Amino acid sequence: MKKIEIYTDGSCLNNPGFGGYAYIVRYKEHEKVGFGSQKDTTNNRMELLAIIEALKTLKEACEIELFTDSKLMVQSINEWLEIWIKKDFKGKKNVDLWQEYIKLAKSHKIKAFWVKAHNNHPENEKCDKLAREAALNLQKEYNEKT
């Protein structure tokens, strides 16, 4: 099983508002970077979407170390998700994305790790910048159309 590192971040202007996400998927010397944006979203949706989009890039089962500055994502993946599934996500938000995450994650072994935001962590800084730029660009495009 390949060992992969994934770094993610999500951003949202006004929360809810224009959002952006970014990820870095690394295997040995190979690196794939991706980002995107949505309107009418939240920072938590963007954080989770970054993880989902990163997982979509993988073509086989992998052992994954996931690094994010979202304690919510770390605790959700490492501790809470199994409980939520047993309780059929009763009272939980972003169920659509969590269900997509579960489908994508089932073939992988994933352990999530928290990194402090804005603390000169190179990959986190890069993801933060890309996610924020994606949100700002979408906002700019939207404002130019209206």
Image (cartoon, grey):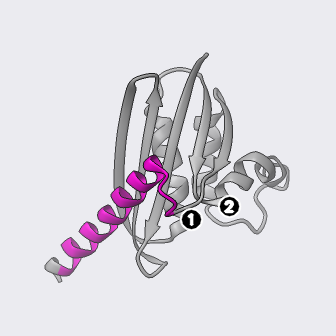
Is 61 located above or below residue 124 in the figure?
Answer: above
Q: Magenta part of the protein: which range?
A: 118-143
Position of 2 compared to 136: left or right?
right
C-alpha distance separating marks 2 and 1:
8 Å
Badge 1 density bin: few <14, some 14–19, many ≥20, Cα 10 Å = many
Q: At x 64% / y 28%, what residue is drawn?
A: 108
Outermost residue toward the front in this view: 120
Picture quarter containing residue 134? bottom left
Q: Main secondary structure of the magenta part?
A: helix
Place of residue 31 in the rendered image (x, y in percent of width and height, measured from the top left):
38, 31
The kind of residue on which mark 2 rests is: Leu
Q: Which residue is mark 2?
A: 72
Where disc 1 sits, the SS reads: helix
Badge 2 density bin: few <14, some 14–19, many ≥20, Cα 10 Å = some
Q: Which residue is mark 1?
A: 44
Q: Nearer the viewer, residue 113 or 144?
A: 113
Place of residue 21 in the rendered image (x, y in percent of width and height, measured from the top left):
42, 57
Position of 32 compared to 62: left or right?
left
Q: At x 46% / y 36%, what residue is drawn?
A: 56
In the rendered structure, are the residues bearing label 2 and label 1 in contact, judged by CB atoms less than 8 Å apart? Answer: yes
* Nearest-to-viewer mark from 2 and 1: 2
In magenta stretch: residue 135: yes
> Which is more N-terminal, label 1 or label 2?
1
Is 24 located above or below residue 28 in the figure?
Answer: below
The kind of residue on which mark 1 rests is: Asn
Position of 114 compared to 124: left or right?
right
In magenta stretch: residue 120: yes
Place of residue 53 in the rendered image (x, y in percent of width and height, measured from the top left):
45, 44
